[in-house]
Amino acid sequence: MASALSSRRIVGLLLLLCVVFIWVGSSFLVSNLFGEQDFNHPFFITYLNTGTFSFYLVGAYFSRRHSHDRIGQRKRSASEESLSSQTSEEGSPLVSDGQPAQHSHAPPLLQAKLTVRETVQLGVSFCMLWFAANITQNASLAYTTVANSSILCATSGLFTLAIGAVAGVERFNAMRLGAVLVSIMGVYSIMHYGADPAGVQAMPLAWFGDLLALSSAFLYGCYTTLLKLKIGDESRLDSSLFFGSVGLANIVLLWPGFFLLHWLGIETFALPGSASLWLMILVNALIGTFLSDYLWLMAVLMTSPLVVTLGLSLTIPLSMAGDILWKGVAVGLPYYVGAVMILAAFIAANL
């Protein structure tokens, strides 16, 4: 049993590593969309990305159809075997009088697979929290600096640990608390001291942007804990139905946001103006969201929300490493110190 749990955790960590690299690549692509391509429409991109989850409903349909066919085949086989047994026993009862039929014990409640209704309800709840967390994070960048937003979003580890401990899905101890604090300090070291701050201008509504980033961190802690609490083990979840529900809820419930943001002048509605721009957006949607979020969920269920949260902080030093290699960004010693602190915090959370 211990060996099986260890193998499952290793698989979860490998999936998390894949997510980290995908998200780093996605961040460079989105940065290019907002910058060089001048397509600064975060709501449109978030809506489209989340909407791609609805394609999972196709897989859910064929999976359930195949499952029903197999159940029907087993029932026919069982019926034929029962008829054959009755004939061979010359009409003798299969269960003797006064003796109840033997049934296998039902699996514990916690191990029961989520029903269709439960899965859809969880998908809708997750969609609202996930979209809110992403929008507040993107919106924070309009009012505060990237450094402040990244540092405050990194506090999601603290929220995840606190909310998870209250919900009973995380162990709260000094080492884990220390790991979260070290991770936040590492992010702070990288974002505040690690890069050249030249060209950064004061922003009059920075406090509002900081509040949005902090709200995003809190919402992240809420939805990761919600998933672990409601699902527990990945075997209980029809992942195709879950993600399909998330995508459908996004399409049906959130489209008024286009009109509201356009009317308020926050984000003018516009479609990509070229085939290359569409290609970049769709690649980001299908790989950066459609695939990576599936891997992310499996990593959460196979490890823990806190481990995944601290692991995702690795995207910050990796993203800056990309800037160093491809953009020639100059960094100081605090960058390397911060990167080591983030890595050490992730390792400590796994002990």
Image (spheres, grey):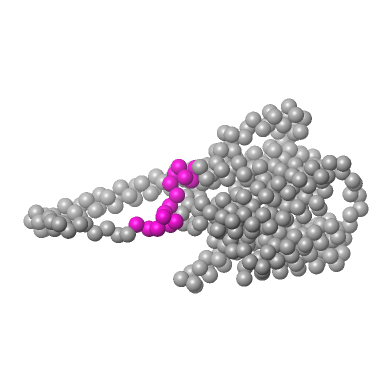
Point out residue 147 in the picture as x, y percentages from the top left corner.
81, 53
Q: Which residues are magenta?
A: 106-120
Q: In the image shown, does 291 or 314 lie closer to the viewer?
A: 314
Q: In the image shown, does 43 or 132 lie closer to the viewer?
A: 132
Q: Is residue 66 left or right of residue 126?
A: left
The residue shown at (58%, 53%) is 225
Query: Count the marks: how many?
Result: 0
Residue 295 in view in this figure: no
Residue 301 in view in this figure: yes
Q: Residue furthest left?
A: 90
The residue shown at (60%, 41%) is 128
Point out residue 33 in the picture as x, y percentages from the top left corner.
75, 43
Q: Is residue 92 left or right of residue 76?
A: left
Residue 143 is covered by the magenta coloring: no
Q: Is residue 52 left or right of residue 207?
A: left
Q: Residue furthest top?
A: 263
